[in-house]
Image (cartoon, coloured by chain):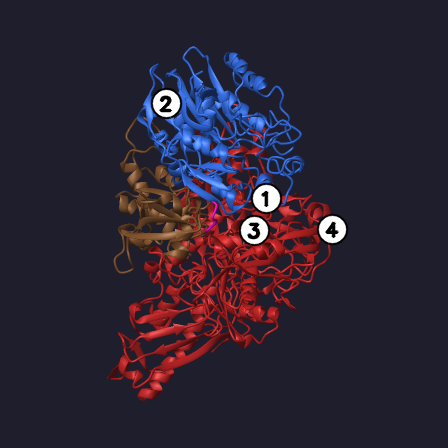
Chain colours: A blue, B red, C brown
Amino acid sequence: MRSFSYERATSPGAAAAAAATTANAKFIAGGTNLLDLMKLEIETPAHLIDVNDLALDRIDETADGGLRIGALVRNTDLAADRRVRRDYGVLSRALLAGASGQLRNKATTAGNLLQRTRCPYFYDTNLPCNKRKPGSGCAAIGGFSRQHAVVGVSDACIATHPSDMAVAMRALDAVVETVRPDGTTRNIPIAELHRLPSDSPEIETTLQPGELITAVTLPKPIGGTQVYRKVRDRASYAFALVSVAAIVQRDGSGRVALGGVAHKPWRVEAAEAELPGGAKAVTARLFADAKQTRDNAYKLPLAERTLAAVLREGGA
Amino acid sequence: MRFEHSATFNPIDQLKVIGHPTSRIEGPLKTTGTAPYAYERHDVVANQAYGYVVGAAIGKGRIAAIDLDAAKAAPGVLTIVTADSAGKLGKGARNAAPLLGGPEIAHYHQAVAVVVAGTFEQARAAAQLVRIDYVKGDGKFDLAAERDSVSIPDPTIGGPADTAVGDFASAFVAAPVQLDATYTTPDQGHAMMEPHASIAAWDGDKLTIWTSNQMIAWGAEDMAKTLGIPKENVRLVSPHIGGGFGGKLFLRADVLLAALGARAAGRPVKVALQRPLMFNNTTHRPATIQRIRIGAERDGRITAIGHESWSGNVSEGEPDMAVSQTRLLYAGANRMTATRLATLDLPEGNAMRAPGEASGMMALEIAIDELVDKLGIDPVALRIANDTQVDPEHPKRRFSQRQLVQCLNEGAARFGWSKRNAKPGQVRDGRWLVGMGVAAAFRNNLVTKSAARVRLDQQGRVTVETDMTDIGTGSYTIIAQTAAEMMGVPLEKVGVRLGDSDFPVSCGSGGQWGGNNSTAGVYAACTKLRETIAQKLGFNSEEAVFADGAVRSGNRSVPLAHAAGAGDLVAEDAIEYGDLAKTYQQSTFGAHFVEVGVDADTAEIRVRRMLAVCAAGRILNPKAARSQVIGAMTMGVGAALMEDLVVDKRHGLFVNHDLAGYEVPVHADIPHQDMIFLDETDPISSPMKAKGVAELGICGVAAAVANAVHNATGVRVREYPITLDKLLEWLDVD
Amino acid sequence: MAKVSFDVNGETHQFELDTRTTLLDALREHLHLTGTKKGCDHGQCGACTVIVDGRRINSCLTLAVMHQGDEITTIEGLGTPDALHPLQAAFVEHDGYQCGYCTPGQICSAVAVLAEVKAGIPSHVTTDLNAPVRLTNAELRERMSGNICRCGAYSNIAEAISAVAGRSA
């Protein structure tokens, strides 16, 4: 871990401004991913801006009946919030499927969205990785890729986004609120927050340098049966091989987002029109442009079968 | 004391203390965080500096240039040791690849430098500044690809490369029912929770190392040899070991680098291997390819059994002896085994819990289940039908004890085996396809010399000193129980000091030999102390009775505290063995029963019930012994369902080299485990009449899981681990 | 270097630390409270679990300087060999450990798990998110899954915790 200077920010605007004016600065909140990567010098900030003192740890009801989740709300608190459990069950379930009790107590809403991939080649600084060292190549392609992405991949990167929470938020049409270094704020639909790897996998989100996530807003509840199903070898404390977030309405309509298959939570709204046709029809659309490896080809049938199970559970 | 004849009645048979489920005597220390492990010995020496290890970035090749300027200039750096500056180093007798690489690189993450600084943070940061240019060599990393260019090894342990009895080839061809199947097991990591760690301090030419090591005498000896210094100048201290499983049997890089760092820095240095380094830097259980052929009569009797195994290792490394149990477990007149070794440039393969049998039983006990499919005989009945009470290669040589049949029968009754549907894929519980599986458990019992020293003081306290280690096995407790039983004192009056090379050399912890041999060594020392006491009191040592804190003969009784007199009474002795292990085959037996659920949609596999029934001689402490077995069962579940050090055959490394990537079971993977021991005493094994249990518990577990998965789904997976992607295409969509 | 002060087991400590120092290393290397273990240093094993302001966390993945004013409980704060916490005693009685290295983390986690259930925090295996949480067998095992025990004492650990929680595993 390289040496860094450390400050505790006092307001979101000040934090964003500091991030823009200090060379190689990073925000730190829960720290559960950032410190992991700093120890390996995959992340090498020269300055850390601790945002934990910012009053962003509330969950408030919005005027239109939704919820505004502060960026610093811990995963445990978000999952346990009575309104989230009642109205956004898929989100509570996704959070609880992730990590461990200890990690969920530290990890924050914003930090969870900004987690970096768990690709083992990204984690080993001796090996090529375009995400870690642009232009060095992708060791996962042609290597051990059982856990990697099957859709939205590029020749530069086949990493997945590891979050469970983000998959549920994608199904819920969450909106990410930010403040930029110049003090202006903006709302980013979660669909537009994460990028596909293309030829620049090192750029993972559409956030600008210094831009700070302050909250995530959930639209008013849409009801339905909400299911989050995470598939993994180990029964707990493991990342998803495939996960399915689904919200199924009585009339058979619904929403589906997948985790563990792409560089971002994977949702294709057009595919949801196929829900009456069942899981096969939906996944055919979701995976229309799939590009699997020998190691991870199983994810295509696995996602279909998992979705089928979820739809049964959802009563569709 | 030489043990040459079957044990008769002795003080251990009183079972006043031995055989009781005593809680561990060091338990209050472990549960309060006050049991000291290697890296945290702030108490032993002042002014400790921190070492951080740099591992090789390539799998094979050499260092072309190494630039330490930036690292040396970094804040707090005291010294950096590389092969260039380490001076001439030897190699321990038990190390295959050198612990400090350079210029030649033998394997990925082989240590190439240790950076020593005033703080951990400084050392870690400076280690990243070490610049090394490598020239990559052509390494061999693919066992399957090397299968045809293997050598016939000359194993030092576990038997010869080839064995043959009768005429296997003809009998197999002639058999009415034949099985010929090939299985693979992956490389596996010990993944003990405490990383390899050491603090080294020099006092002149004397070196003391507080470390985490299973075999103190081996470690001290190999340290001396590596450094080229006299053995008596090296002291190893290792009172608590945070897990080993074979991974800490040998001298590893942390010990050497701490010693070299301390010598160069001129002050004590501590080194812990970083977790992401451990899987490639240290040893692992090597992958195997195993071909098993069994010929049988239609009634299930085996007429021919052949087991061939291929594994790889660095040059000078040994093969995995996966065929071992096949020489002894089942009857059959015509038999063969073959062990072949490929030279690979992966990290060094070596012992991991039940080396040989653990891998071998993973394959053999699926093969037996496959034979069941061909015969239509119950898997328990088939195993019983092929029981043998003699060594099948030497029919005059009996097993000292062999209760395999009893284990199978008892287990079947307790597990509700009769409720199993023999036809696969028939039982459903909601979303779960449910199946049951069984496997035999088998592991040899090894006897080896072990010494101890026992001291009686004026308070009537008995203190045992031996370099035996407690790696979670319960050594402290069973040694205390042994001394208490022998000297006739309550457990509270016994102190046990372990893991110090200043103490008499024990058997150490490995190969499930620790429990029986180390306590037999204490038995020997206590026997000598009893004689010393009796002599001093003028008692006939044959007649003296040690009980209730006193020694009694006729109507004279003297409290032990008085017997010590003015000074302590000390006796030291070792147990040494005669030919009984040759005359008799000593093995431990068991049966594993497992019920799994396989998700009908996702093919996720979850273990629902587990039972082990074991027969392993006298159980010295049923509580600690049961823990050994359930722990081994847990590791067996890992082997069955998830553990796989994945080889990147291009770069030559285990890719998933941390505890997120190399998955081992967590709480949620393991149901309540049932485990029982059958009554047994084995007078052939030692005066303790005990045998090993800690490795028996893992042997067969993975196959029982695999067989249960087959019973649940009808899918036979022959490549471990059994993961959902290997089942999915065979499972019907609901 | 940065200054920070926090309470550990009821005692206030003031430090001037390298900002890179984790809470785990501050405890082990600076306070010499070595009961909290370093198993992986990357949040993958749970051996470093401590309780901060009533919540269990991995002390390896948090910086000491981020804990100004916090109240931290480590294994040493729960009990001593002569005065064991009920969970410590239960681990001894049920042999809920072998090598002992993960044990302090398991016990700190268990203390927090019982509190989490009491506080009604759901888990991955909670059947009904809108009903009160009960400490079932499955709940206990899921909630403890962030603490790896390679010796495989899980079955006994579950029994130890259940004994304290007042139900059988």
In the image, residue A288 above or below residue A133 = above
Report the front residue among C79 and B590: C79
Q: Residue furthest top?
A: A251
Question: Marks 4 and 2, Cα distance to the nearest angstrom?
Answer: 57 Å
How packed mark 3 is, by other alpha carbons closer than 10 Å (few <14, some 14-19, many 20 or more), is many
Q: Is residue C40 magenta?
A: yes
**Disc sitting over residue B612 in the figure:** none
**Disc sitting over residue B137 in the figure:** 4
Q: Are marks 4 and 3 on the same chain?
A: yes
Which residue does the numbered mark 3 point to in the structure image? B277
In the image, residue B569 above or below residue C151 = below
The magenta segment: C39-43
Q: Position of residue B52 (x, y in %)?
A: 54, 56
Question: Marks 1 and 2, Cα distance to the nearest angstrom?
Answer: 37 Å
Confirm or deny contact between disc 4 and disc 2 (CB under 8 A).
no
Which residue does the numbered mark 2 point to in the structure image? A68
How packed mark 1 is, by other alpha carbons closer than 10 Å (few <14, some 14-19, many 20 or more), is some
